[in-house]
């Protein structure tokens, strides 16, 4: 199905959306103690309740998970002794993998907690007036456009042959030219919850790492910069309220070609603390 793809000439460009300010609250706070210093995060208990419950349950040892070394179900302080296994300068630091490789998890996956409308994804067009794809889509080639926009749309529309495409090409063209980012992401498999108040991923945000829609487990990352292109793709469930200089320091450590710190950056413990007055 290449006919429709040929109708689109891709240019790169788009706009950015400002992140909304956070309001003070009585949300739970956690101290992430590392061998490079302490980081205090505020958790968005109302905005991402399941994600916060999962993070706290793993941190405090009250949630059952599968130990990857024994393959047995256990309860213990999950994050203690793990590392920030992926550090990308000018982007983010990532931790929470029991294997230290980015391939491990707690033995289960759970759904995202994101409100696309609260993040403005229902207002942003996939294509601008010049036919250029929105930069948050990360499209760099025609094949990217096919994989990100066209093929998912064909699946939703039930188009499975060139003959069906030819018969409905005008309808496809109309759908693509009026499509918003929210629809494009839903076509890719993301599911959104209109009852939540979501936060945009910005500098200092604490968010779930994943391998696609609804694949959350134990891995998380902290943004070193604003990352608007991740909007709607990762559950933001907290923010750094103290120790951002530690996050920045971790973000500068020497790493291998796979972004693994040369000298391990260890998570000594993650524990709940009282918010500072």
Image: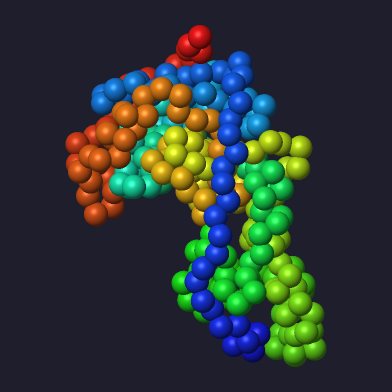
Question: Can the viewer see residue 265?
Answer: yes
Residue 210 position, x and y percent, is 51, 46
Instruction: Note whether 109 is above or below 67 in the view shown.
Output: below
The image quadrant of residue 249 is top left
Residues 27 and 108: in front is 27
- At x 27% / y 45%, what residue is drawn? 260
The N terminus: image quadrant: bottom right
- At x 47% / y 48%, what residue is drawn? 227
- At x 31% / y 28%, what residue is drawn? 246
Q: How many marks?
A: 0
Residues 201 and 6: in front is 201
In this image, 269 relative to 47: left or right? left
Question: Can the viewer see residue 219?
Answer: no
In this image, 39 relative to 276: left or right? left
Residue 42 position, x and y percent, is 52, 23
In this image, 83 relative to 1: left or right? left
Instruction: Note whether 253 is above or below 146 in the view shown.
Output: above
Colour pattern: rainbow
Residue 204 position, x and y percent, is 44, 35
The image quadrant of residue 63 is top right
In this image, 253 relative to 160: left or right? left
- At x 30% / y 47%, what residue is drawn? 89
Instruction: Note whether 78 is above or below 157 in the view shown.
Output: above
């Amino acid at each position: 199905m290449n006919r429709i793809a040929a109708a689109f000439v891709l240019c790169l460009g788009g706009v950015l959306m400002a992140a909304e300010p956070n309001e003070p609250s009585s949300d739970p706070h956690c101290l992430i103690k590392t061998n490079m210093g302490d980081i205090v995060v505020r958790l968005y208990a109302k905005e991402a309740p399941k994600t916060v419950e999962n993070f706290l349950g793993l941190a405090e040892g009250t949630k059952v998970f599968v130990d990857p070394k024994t393959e047995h179900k256990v309860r213990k302080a999950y994050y203690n002794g793990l590392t920030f296994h992926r550090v990308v300068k000018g982007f983010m630091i990532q931790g929470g993998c029991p294997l230290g490789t980015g391939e491990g998890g707690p033995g289960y996956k759970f759904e995202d907690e994101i409100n696309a409308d609260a993040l403005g994804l229902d207002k942003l067009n996939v294509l601008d007036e010049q036919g250029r794809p929105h930069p948050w889509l990360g499209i760099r080639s025609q094949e990217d456009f096919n994989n990100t926009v066209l093929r998912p749309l064909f699946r939703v529309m039930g188009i499975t042959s060139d003959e069906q495409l030819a018969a409905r090409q005008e309808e496809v063209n109309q759908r693509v030219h009026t499509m918003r980012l929210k629809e494009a992401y839903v076509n890719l498999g993301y599911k959104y919850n209109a009852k939540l108040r979501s936060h945009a991923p910005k500098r200092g945000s604490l968010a779930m790492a994943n391998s696609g829609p609804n694949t959350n487990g134990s891995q998380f990352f902290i943004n070193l910069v604003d990352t608007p292109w991740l909007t709607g793709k990762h559950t933001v469930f907290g923010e750094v309220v103290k120790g951002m200089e530690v996050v920045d320091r971790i973000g500068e450590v020497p790493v291998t070609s796979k972004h693994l710190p040369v000298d391990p950056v260890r998570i000594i413990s993650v524990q709940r603390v009282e918010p500072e007055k």
